Amino acid sequence: MYVISLMGVSKVIEAPVHQIKKWIQLFGSYIPMTFMDQILYFEIEAVHILSFIKEKIEEEYDWTEIESLLEHTVFGE
């Protein structure tokens, strides 16, 4: 399994760490994460999901609309 750190995700999707943490609080059930040695890492698919969330926020979708889209969108296939 390939994983990436929070800082790595932040750099890849060009979003600040504090913003990504907020998204994790709101949409964590849709973001594949794992702990290794008590450190949070994200599975590669999470980069696509967080990019999607960022894109929808920039398009001014509200939180409930984004959650609905996440429920019906397939990532990583």
Image: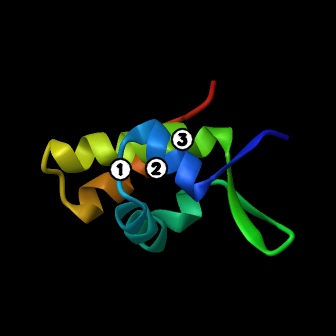
Residue 77, given in percent of the width and then of the height, sits at: 63, 24
Kind of residue sitting beneath label 1 = Ala
The residue beneath circle 2 is 10
Q: How many marks?
A: 3
Residue 72: in sight, yes or no?
Answer: no
Q: How far apart are marks 3 and 2 (CA)?
A: 9 Å
Residue 6, located in which quarter of the rendered image? bottom right
Residue 72's x, y, as percent? 45, 43
Q: Is residue 57 visible?
A: yes
- Which class describes the residues within 10 Å of circle 2: few (<14), some (14-19), or many (20+)? some
Task: Give the labeled residue for mark 1.
Answer: 15
Residue 47: mark: 3
Three-letter code, disc 2: Ser
Tell me where residue 23 appears, x and y as whole percent. 40, 64
SS at mark 2 in the image: helix
Q: Earlier in the sequence, mark 2 or mark 1?
A: 2
Marks 2 and 1 close (CB-CB < 8 Å): yes
